[in-house]
Image: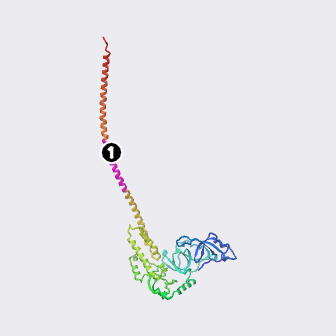
């Protein structure tokens, strides 16, 4: 399934001009920018080398890692075309599709070996070519594999079985396991699905069978071409049946597929499945016990637990919606409580201010009363003064008249003739 570039013509060298983004194969396909394209050489086309700078490499701490390298032309190809717009939101893949899976900052070729879950919760198990291993991916982490051949993109046919290279590696790994090592594993749980394969909408778990791993090489689920299909069932294990009988599962029936547990050791799978089932039960219980005055961090914590449950096939849409609605109501209540506290604070401030105003008003009334009394007293005094002034003016007039008479009589007497 490798897709190395073939001989390039002079015409298609424009696809690899300086500054162009390309993909470079170093096991997986990594996005890189052409820093120094080679000059076309018809005599030695196979020896052309590119200087490229990888774009998406990151260190363990998440920081970007800049790396430049000279690579042969046969390991360089253009960026594959994006999926059509109507498929960009949710690409759908089927068992045996050849795909590229995004991990470790690059795209790695593999074959879809299993499809689990429904719609948004769909999980794809992919048997990678290099290194040979099976891993689970979401739709957004996959793309259909394309080979760059003769200046064209070619999509390979479905692979009905593992490539010879992968099969050979797997065979060597299985031969390396001694019987004693298998016996050390003891009896483990083989998990089978009812009816359809894991990718079917009705892939409901049916039973759990115990088997000796020393005698069983691989389990089979219907016609899924995949080794060691260890998928969880719920009907025959007493503990799992008890958990499934709980009220929370009766109110909200679930069909978990537990596909991510395929990557775990068999001995841990049942315990981990129980853990996720009890997590679901506890989430539902905690929601039912929530009070309107509960801390917002509790709801945040419950919401954070849902994506992992979702990845194992639990339908948490109603649970998430209920939590989001409760958060909305909680925020509304907190907003109203804040407004109420502000109103109460303002009432208290206004009451205190009113008390001060009333005290000042009473003081003003007392002062006005004193001034009114003083006014009445002054008016009375003014009237009495006016009366006395009038009397004095009348006396003044009479006295002036008498003085004039006396002065007249004096003048007459003084001027009397002498004999």
Count of numbered badges drawn on the protein? 1
Say if residue 176 shows up in the picture: yes
Residue 78: name its quadrant.
Answer: bottom right
Q: Position of residue 164 (x, y in %)?
A: 57, 84
Instruction: Check the image and report above or below for 261 versus 409.
Output: below
Residue 107: name its quadrant.
Answer: bottom right
Magenta stretch: give its range: 347-373
From the viewer's perspective, is 377 left or right of 206? left
Q: Position of residue 294 (x, y in %)?
A: 39, 68
Nearer to the camera, 55 or 95: 55
For image coordinates 32% across by 45% down, the residue present is 367
Nearer to the camera, 65 or 79: 65
Q: Main secondary structure of the magenta part?
A: helix
Q: Position of residue 151 (x, y in %)?
A: 64, 75
Q: Position of residue 350 (x, y in %)?
A: 37, 54
* SS for callout 1: helix
In reply to whether residue 283 is colored magenta, the answer given is no
- In the picture of the structure, the residue carrying the numbered disc 1 is 367
From the viewer's perspective, is 153 left or right of 361? right
């Amino acid at each position: 399934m490798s897709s190395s570039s073939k001989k390039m013509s002079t015409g298609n060298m424009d696809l690899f001009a300086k500054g162009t983004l390309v993909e470079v194969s170093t096991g997986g396909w990594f996005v890189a920018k052409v820093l120094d394209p080679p000059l076309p050489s018809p005599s030695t086309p196979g020896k052309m080398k590119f200087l490229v700078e990888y774009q998406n490499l990151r260190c363990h701490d998440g920081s970007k890692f800049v790396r430049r390298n000279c690579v042969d032309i046969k390991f360089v190809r253009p960026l594959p075309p994006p999926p059509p717009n109507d498929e960009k939101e949710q690409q759908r893949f089927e068992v045996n599709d050849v795909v590229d899976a995004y991990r470790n900052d690059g795209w790695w070729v593999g074959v879809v070996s299993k499809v689990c879950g429904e719609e948004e919760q769909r999980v794809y198990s992919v048997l990678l070519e290099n290194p040979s291993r099976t891993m689970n991916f979401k739709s957004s982490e996959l793309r259909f594999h394309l080979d760059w051949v003769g200046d064209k993109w070619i999509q390979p046919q479905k692979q009905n079985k593992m490539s010879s290279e992968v099969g050979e590696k797997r065979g060597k790994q299985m031969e390396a396991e001694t019987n004693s090592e298998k016996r050390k594993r003891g009896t483990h749980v083989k998990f089978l699905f009812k009816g359809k394969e894991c990718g079917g909408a009705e892939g409901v778990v049916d039973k759990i069978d115990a088997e000796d791993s020393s005698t069983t090489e691989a389990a089979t689920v219907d016609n899924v071409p995949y080794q060691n299909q260890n998928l969880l069932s719920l009907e025959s294990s007493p503990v799992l049946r008890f958990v499934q009988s709980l009220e929370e599962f009766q109110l909200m029936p679930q069909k978990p597929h537990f596909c991510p547990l395929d990557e775990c050791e068999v001995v841990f799978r049942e315990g981990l499945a129980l853990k996720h089932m009890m997590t679901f039960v506890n989430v539902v219980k905690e929601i039912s016990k929530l009070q309107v005055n509960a801390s917002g961090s509790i709801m945040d914590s419950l919401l954070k637990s849902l994506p992992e449950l979702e990845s194992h096939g639990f339908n948490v849409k109603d649970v998430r919606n209920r939590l989001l609605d409760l958060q909305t109501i909680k925020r509304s209540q907190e907003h109203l409580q804040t407004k109420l506290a502000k109103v109460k604070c303002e009432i208290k401030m206004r009451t205190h201010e009113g008390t001060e105003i009333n005290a000042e008003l009473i003081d003003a009334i007392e002062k006005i009363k004193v001034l009114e009394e003083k006014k009445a007293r002054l008016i009375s005094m003014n009237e009495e003064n006016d009366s006395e002034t009038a009397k004095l003016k009348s006396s003044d007039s009479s006295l002036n008249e008498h003085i004039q008479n006396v002065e007249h009589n004096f003048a007459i007497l003084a001027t009397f003739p002498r004999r």
